[in-house]
Amino acid sequence: MTVQANDPGLSISAGSGTRIRPLLEWFARRAEAVAIGLVAILIGLALFSLFILVIGKSPVTLFQLMYTGGFGSWFSVQNSLSRAAPLLLTALCVALPARLGLVIIGGEGAVVLGGVAAAAAAMPLLGLVPPAVLFVFMGLAAMVIGGLWIGLAGFLRHYRGVNETISSLLLAYIAIALMNQFVEGPLRDPASLNKPSTRPLPAEYMMGDIPGMDVHWGLIIGILACILSWILMEATSYGFAARIAGGNVRAAQIQGLPVGKLITGFTAIAGSFAGLAGMVEVAAVQGSANASLAAGYGYTGILVAFLARHNPLAIIPVAILLGGIDASGGLIQRRMGLPDATVLVLQGTLFIVILFCETFYGRFRIFDPDLWKRSA
Amino acid sequence: MDESGIGFWGVPLAIFAGAIRVSTPFIFVSLGETITERSGRINLGLEGTLVFGAMSAYAVTVLTSSPWLGVLAAMATGAVFGLVHGWICKFPKVNDIAIGIAMMQFGLGLAFFLGKPFIQPAAPKLPSILLGGWSGIPQVQAALNINVLFFIGASLAVFLFWAFKNTRIGLTLRVVGDSTDAARAMGLSPDTVRLLATAVGSSLAAVGGAYLSLYYPGSWNEGISSGQGLMAVALVIFARWNPIGCFLAALLFGGAGALGPALQSVGVTQGYYLFYAAPYVLTLIILIITSSPTRSLAGAPGVLSLTK
């Protein structure tokens, strides 16, 4: 069968096919991911609507409120963006190891220890250095401890065969206990009575807002981290090697790739991002390290990463979407009298349906590049 | 005899009492997870199942004032969660670990959502058996005041140990868990076996939750679980998929968890929070010592993705 070349982009002949094919495949794969993702979200929303109907409330009102609360006004958009900031970083803590085939669910531990490390690093430097330098030291301290914490899970996985899901989780519980110990003990500000905290940062040492917005700099840090991670994964030889190791460990080892170093390194990078989330929380939101650091950002990050299918760039819109859902919780509670857990139910439903829809990848021939070639 | 009469003897006694009191939910959850994992599947969502079980047990007990009906209700809801997990996981390309995390978030959210009206009312507790009547020391009496569910859990561990080896159901479960192909060749349906194993495992986990809300600490609130459902997965590896091992591991874990409060009761308050981490540190160390990068764990079901 001869191929009609009516569109230069799709013209396939023996000569040009090899050049067009990768582009076509790339496009088909993206189209499949977007289509299946959107359908999954619609199914999830439909199931959630059913649940809301069963308990006798109107899903239409709920979704309207969700939109108003999350994205309806400039104020709510800014609120959503602020909530998205830590999620960008904790999602990377799941997404990067996932590309190597590892399921890390203990990002929460790196967040809380990152926050404690940042607060501890700030103490001796207050008044000695300008805020920008202080933030660099706080960020480095947080990233080092976060990187060590999650990197340990990767290290144990490769060199001792300890399951990384379990070890990262155990490490998260240990981290929270350590945080409580530090915050109640050596690092405690004697003035913090009801809620033990480290000494608060003075106002001039707080990381402020992005100019013209009511959103702190954490958002920019998070977006930059996502872009850098994407470049690392897609455009460097390290990322390429990591993806090979994630696809087939044996093949990677036969190729002579340093799988152990890749796993340890990438989990450490992932952990350092989660640690940075803790630093942002201290420097931009709380002003001190305290139990509020364990607010569940690490766990919501898991959801964000899976929804984004571990693509660092896709994490940005997904985190903002979930930040918006999160931000609308209060409004739903006030206007409809529904518990604040409504948002959790919606998140859980979406999470299950989206994972379930993984099964549809490769099932629909419409996304098969070969089909397009023939019909073109 | 007065409070201080037994002095530092109170520490081992409190650890013993704590081990029994704290371990019961761990026994049920880890036995449940053992059943599921023996069939070759991991259910990481037991934390959600456990908390939902705690909520439904408490709610039904408040409404009917019968704690045993509460336990039954928890088992039923647990089975439903397990069926959902098992059904979703039978589809190709679906990752059982990820679905577990999702089910956990869903279960927690739903439990908090539906459980909101039940935070205030009080529910009758599950009965316990007084074994300490022979002693005049109140601490000893309190330590030997043991809940019925603990004995049920202990007997269940022994029963499962026997059943895995000696019953048709136990052998079926193990074949399916060790080799999907061998099971198919024998005419078994691996998906159905795993579906049922996940449902049974989940309903046991929910009993663990019922213990939390109906006995110790004996109330329903959103912070009722301190990760018992998640820890179960680690305990099962630690126990090498052996039900009696699960029972012992749960006791050890409960005892380690009771260390902090026990020391605090005799005036040792230094490093209080670090003692909270003791069970997790202990589990991690044991995992590090016993794992190996070159071979899968002894006793691990062959199909299990956890150990690959």
Image (cartoon, coloured by chain):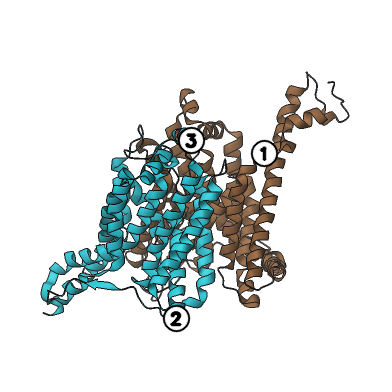
Residue A18 seen in this snapshot: yes
* Residue depicted at 66% across the width and 51% down the height: A40
Q: Is residue A369 left or right of residue A323?
A: right
Disc 2 secondary structure class: loop
Q: Which residue is mark 3?
A: B184
**In the rendered picture, chain A carries what hue?**
brown
Q: Which residue is mark 1?
A: A363
Q: Is residue B131 left or right of residue B247?
A: left
Residue A209 seen in this snapshot: no
Given the image, what chain letter belongs to the residue carrying mark 3?
B
Given the image, what chain letter belongs to the residue carrying mark 2?
B
Instruction: Decide: few, some or many residues near mark 3? Use Cα within 10 Å; few <14, some 14-19, many ≥20.
Output: few
From what the image shows, is residue A86 above or below residue A13? Answer: below
Closest to the observer, B253 or B34: B34
Do marks 1 and 3 share a chain?
A: no
Residue B279, percent across and down? Answer: 30, 56
Instruction: Decide: few, some or many residues near mark 1? Use Cα within 10 Å; few <14, some 14-19, many ≥20.
Output: few
Q: Are marks 1 and 3 in contact (CB under 8 Å)?
A: no
Residue B129, percent across and down? Answer: 24, 71
Instruction: Decide: few, some or many residues near mark 2? Use Cα within 10 Å; few <14, some 14-19, many ≥20.
Output: few
Q: Is residue A81 left or right of residue B87?
A: right
Given the image, what chain letter belongs to the residue carrying mark 1?
A
Q: Quadrant of residue A75?
A: bottom right
Q: CA distance from mark 1 to mark 3?
A: 24 Å
Disc 3 secondary structure class: helix
**Label disc, if present, on residue B121 of the rendered structure:** 2
Q: CA distance from mark 1 to mark 2?
A: 51 Å
**In the rendered picture, chain B carries what hue?**
cyan
Residue B188, percent across and down? Answer: 47, 39
Q: Are marks 1 and 2 in contact (CB under 8 Å)?
A: no
Closest to the observer, A353 or A18: A353
The amino acid sitting under disc 2 is Pro
